[in-house]
Amino acid sequence: MSSPTNTSSPTEPARAGAAIDVQQLHKYFGDNEVLKGIDFHVDNGQVVCVVGPSGSGKSTLLRCVTLLETPTQGKIFVEGVEVTDPDVDIDRLRSRIGMVFQQFNLFPHMTVLRNLCVAQQKVRKLSKEQAVAIARENLAKVGLSEKEQAYPAHLSGGQQQRVAIARALSMQPQLMLFDEPTSALDPELVGEVLAVMKELAAEGMTMMVVTHEMGFAREVGDKLVFMDGGVIVEEGAPAEVLSNPQQERTRAFLSKVL
Ligand code: ADP
Ligand code: MG
């Protein structure tokens, strides 16, 4: 689905087999250019981890993919559909993408089960019975079947984030985006969330993961992308980038986090 009116940049059609294809993306906030020509892709079934210092533009990149931020220039395709086309169906786009953030954003006044059902019923128009069945399947997947009647405040941070993942999965997305999903957690709770994400990856889910967890990136990632100052400085196989970074900026960053 190309936009015949957008002839401003010499971009290509969507990359074949790409779940996410970002071409020459620029994003300004006022005069501040925070993404300076990003070319980035996630192929179907891949896990791509994005790392980099605070303020480098990682969240903005992720948010542009779902149009939570409006790209200033460039093209983005999701599953071959150009989301930077002005006529794109944003609701349809978002229904294909599961999102998990640092803050779990669960509805505090609803039980875990309701948290998983409400959007299924309201957005996907499923019956309550259908929604509950899908919710239970996903609660089992994250190991929290016994918590379906609990309220979020009665769960640990790790459990809340696993509920947030189950809620995103209950919309049956084609890809999942994670923005520092373990950064708000106490250290001893990080592992249980990473384990759920690892299992999801093993099932073949396409994932874009902004993270500081280099162990996860090395073990689970198909590709590691290092961003700094609004550009992709370096990318490659995680083990390769982590053990043999080619750029000074990557080396400097890794020496602080590894
Ligand atoms: P990261 O996720 O890598 O920490 P962000 O994408 O959040 O980086 O931010 C990149 C830059 O964009 C930062 O300088 C930040 O202050 C700026 N920025 C992010 N969101 C906004 C916004 N809504 N308005 C203005 N500036 C923003
Ligand atoms: Mg961020």
Image (cartoon, grey):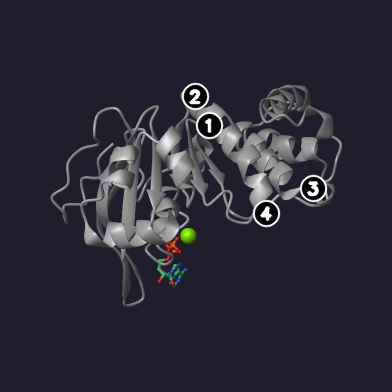
Could you tell me the amino acid type at mark 3? Pro
Q: Does the residue at mark 3 contact the one at mark 4 (Cβ under 8 Å)?
A: no
Could you tell me the amino acid type at mark 1? Lys
Q: Give the CA separation, mark 4 to mark 2.
A: 25 Å
Residue beneath label 4, please?
A: 186
Judge whether residue 162 can be spotted in this image: yes
Q: Nearer the viewer, mark 3 or mark 4?
A: 4
Picture coordinates of residue 15 (x, y %)?
Answer: 24, 34
Q: Is residue 96 above or below residue 234?
A: above
Label 4 near ligand 2 (CB < 8 Å): no
Q: Secondary structure at mark 2?
A: helix
Residue nearer the viewer, 76 or 47: 47
Residue nearer the viewer, 25 or 218: 218
Q: Residue at x 44, y 65 (%)?
A: 54
Q: Give the CA separation, mark 3 to mark 2.
A: 28 Å
Q: Give the CA separation, mark 1 to mark 2.
A: 6 Å
Taking the image as shown, residue 210 lies to the left or right of residue 183, namely: left
Rendered-image quadrant of the N terminus = top left
Q: Earlier in the sequence, mark 1 or mark 3?
A: 3
Q: Secondary structure at mark 1?
A: helix
Could you tell me the amino acid type at mark 4? Asp
Residue nearer the viewer, 27 or 235: 235
Residue beneath label 3, please?
A: 152
Picture coordinates of residue 139 (x, y %)?
Answer: 72, 29
